[in-house]
Image: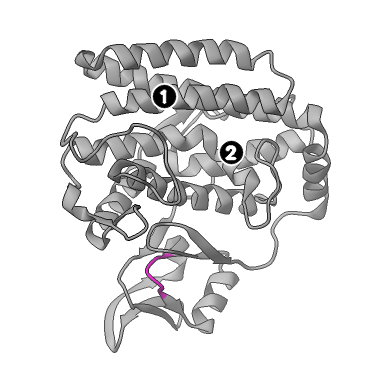
Amino acid sequence: MRQLLNTLYITTPDSHLRKDGTNIVIMKGQEKLGSVPIHNIQQVVCFNQVGATPGVMGLCCDNNVSLTFMTPTGRFVATVNGGVKGNVLLRRAQFRLADDPNASITISRNMIQGKLLNCRFLLKKGLSNHPESGGQVTEAIRVLTESLDEVGEIDNAGQLRSIEGNAARSYFHAIDSLILKDHDHFFMKERSRRPPKDRFNALLSFLYALLTNDVSSSLQSVGLDPYVGFLHTDRPGRPSLALDLMEEFRPLADRVALRVVNLGMVSSDGFLHDEGGGFMMDDGARRIVISEWQEMKNRVFHHPVIDEEVSLGLVPFIQSNLLARCIRGELDGYPPFVYRR
């Protein structure tokens, strides 16, 4: 089993990375902020226009550590990787399946079923812990259950997207009922992006960006192309397969968002309102959210397909492996990630 290593997140503004032997050194001006051995980390993610020397890039590539750059809001900018992993036969099989509507819908349907099951479980758990949340949560559970029944019969990508979109709208309305603290500032009326129009949407967008990066890295590590998907259509610069696969994991990010708000770990003061009408977290809030994201990834989960206890942070890699086996024809179908804890 692959070992879950740390992700090094660099959030300090105006910092830069340099190489010192087999260590990545974090600098701000002439001040040394820290040093991390390359063999202790799995990926490096930089925010706030952090720079990196060619030596750091080479060190990461030589050790199969991805180096990703994002904007302060979590929007992807670029990733530096070493040589392509896996073999060309797997990618050619992936491309053929992506061009086959029947094969694509079979895999996509399983991924969306996993997402709907995980969304429903989150709502049921929230309702159990907070029965006063009531009506909207109960209604969303009903919609998700009906959507699950419908998805099993779908053989068209457009219909699948329509069912998933309707279920997602009901789900996010219910999420609003599970926001229990400072509801004047944290609420979820609808999902909004680019820019996020409220604080909770800004929180979700940031977490989804972290998730997209984790899933993209996992797909690349098993030899799949994260830019060629089955449900999300191809678009230059969009990691369509990563967006397909991460659907199953979005409720994990939603749980982290609810946790940091309901426990008062982030406050409304930790969000900035920009001139374009959008919200973004400040550096302090980002650090708290990243810490909770890492804590979630360290939790142990029994994976029913491989029948092992694994860290949640390893599940994107496991699912990427299962997807690769499905594409190679070693599995009858793709078994989605379904969380029950």
Q: Residue at x 57, y 51 (%)?
A: 216
Q: How many marks?
A: 2
Above-or-below relation of 234 to 12: above
* Lower position in the chain sequence, tag 1 or tag 2: 1
> Is 49 colored magenta in this rendering?
yes
Q: Residue at x 36, y 25 (%)?
A: 173
Above-or-below relation of 304 to 224: above
Q: Quadrant of residue 274?
A: bottom left
**Marks 1 and 2 close (CB-CB < 8 Å):** no
Q: Give the main secondary structure of the magenta stretch.
A: loop
Q: Which residue is mark 2?
A: 245
Above-or-below relation of 87 to 131: below
Q: Provide the residue span drawn in magenta.
A: 46-50
Per the rendering, the mark at residue 171 is 1
Local crowd at mark 1 within 10 Å, few (<14), some, or many (≥20)?
A: many
What element does badge 1 sit on? Answer: helix
Q: Amino acid at mark 1?
A: Tyr
Of tags 1 and 2, which is closer to the observer? 1
Per the rendering, the mark at residue 237 is none
295 left or right of 55 in image: left
58 or 136: which is nearer to us? 136
Q: Quadrant of the C terminus?
A: top left
Q: Amino acid at mark 2?
A: Leu
Q: Is residue 108 visible?
A: yes
> Is 145 colored magenta in this rendering?
no
Tell me where residue 79 appears, x and y as whole percent. Answer: 56, 65
Q: Residue at x 61, y 12 (%)?
A: 150
Tell me where residue 162 appears, x and y as whole percent. Answer: 60, 25
